[in-house]
Amino acid sequence: MTGTAEPDQKAETLAWLRRISGDLATATLKRLEDTLPWYREMPPGRRSAVGLVAQAGISSFIQWYEDPDATPWIAADIFAAAPRELLRSVSLQQTLQLIRVTVEVTEERVAGRGGRVREAILKYSRDVAFAAADVYARAAEARGLWDARLEALVVDSILSGEADAELPSRIAALGWHGHGEVCVLVGTTPPQFDVDHLRRAARKLGVDVLIGVQGSRLVVVMGRSEPDDRGEEHAAELAFPDIASRLEAGFGPGHLVLGPPVPALVDASASARAALAGFAVARAWRHAPRPVEADDLLPERALAGDALAKQTLVERIYRPLQAHSADLVTTLWSYLDNGRSLEATARELFVHPNTVRYRLKRVSEVIGWDATGPREALILQSALILGQVTSLDGARRRPQVAASHKRSGVSSS
């Protein structure tokens, strides 16, 4: 007798649940609006999507109550109602709040139908909560993989210099919070590389980063974060070399080279080219610091055939000195040729050593490099040699061009 009564009671409960399902959905939506501020503030389209999920949950419970073995596909079916809109509209925490409100409304309505129905609701709500967590976990994993691929693509574009019209939109899709100047840092990949640790270290410095791992080479594109996203320290108070020093522990052993700052992320390929060129020749400087700036490796880069380094040496050292005073160029040549001896330079130029000292000070003021240091002397001497070679090449080309113009003028007449 009892065995017959239980199926009859379950069938009666199922019929009753189907009759009140519409009322349950209406009551649930009203309770959501009354108790959840984030739901009230949503645009109508998003509220409708969330409402669809709530209604799907009620309908799915009725189906599950009829056949509990259908739990896996029914729970997944709830979020199939509007999965993309749901994930864009609400967080996992808000989704769990949605489940709780729906369960509360349903429990209140079935309170007089016996403990079995209430027990079924509790078990079902647990399964749905796990299903929701699984949906969000899968979405986060997919998003993480997509972001990693997109980040690698952006870093590759910066390194190759093959930026296209889509680069700004790809950068925006990654959620780049950097603004203003950008630098590229190149080093080796540590054996046990923890990309999240490096990102956390950058955030503490108020820096946003793009990270690219290319085998044994680790590339980090750095930009100062927006003021609202600054870390524990004010990034504006730190120069890029200081930031690179703070991030140095996240790289593997070997040289660490910092490219020069550029105005924006879309211009980062210039900094990347300098950093990569410096990284390739850094071993040629026996006592290179870590990190070392790419512009401190200009002589090695120029000897290796880096056209950008040659151009930088000529334009930042030789031409400014030549434009300022021929005496400065002559004094610098003599000082470097005489082994950085003030007395020997003074004798060669027939001036007082104090005059040589004054002119060297003016050289430092004009170009920012001090000729009295051995490393900077090498940089300045390389610039003078390249500048002289460039001037000779230009002088040779001018007569050839003039002769070509003359010949063309004769032939035309």
Image (spheres, helix red, strand yellow):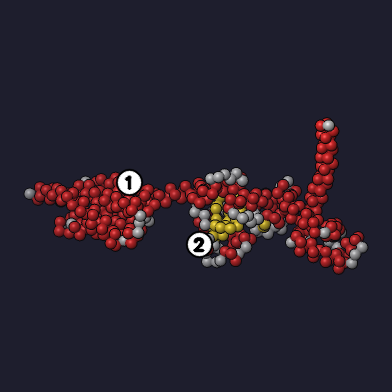
Q: Is residue 199 left or right of residue 83?
A: right
Estimate how packed mark 2 is, as few (under 14), some (14 to 19) or many (20 or more) residues with alpha carbons within 10 Å: some
**Residue sitting at 83 percent across and 66 percent down?**
357
Task: Give the residue number, with chain letter if any, for mark 2.
Answer: 229
x%, y% of residue 49? 32, 50
Sequence-first disc among 2 and 1: 1
Query: Mark 1 is on which residue type?
Result: Ala
**Could you say where residue 203 lies in the image, as x and y percent from the top left?**
52, 61
Q: Secondary structure at mark 1?
A: loop
- x%, y% of residue 207? 55, 60
Rendered position, 328 above or below 84:
below
Which quarter of the figure is the C terminus placed in? top right
Regarding mark 2 in the picture, which secondary structure is present there? helix
- In the rendered structure, find residue 278 and report the number of the disc placed on it: none
Q: Is residue 251 left or right of residue 88?
A: right
- Please rate how many residues cluster around mark 1, counting C-alpha atoms within 10 Å: few if below 14, some from 14 to 19, many from 20: some
Residue 361 x %, y %: 79, 65
Count of numbered labels shown in the rendering:
2
What is the distance, in whole Å, between disc 2 and disc 1 at their CAs? 35 Å
The tag on residue 80 is 1
Amino acid type at image mark 2: Asp
User: Are circles 2 and 1 on residues that touch, CB within 8 Å?
Assistant: no
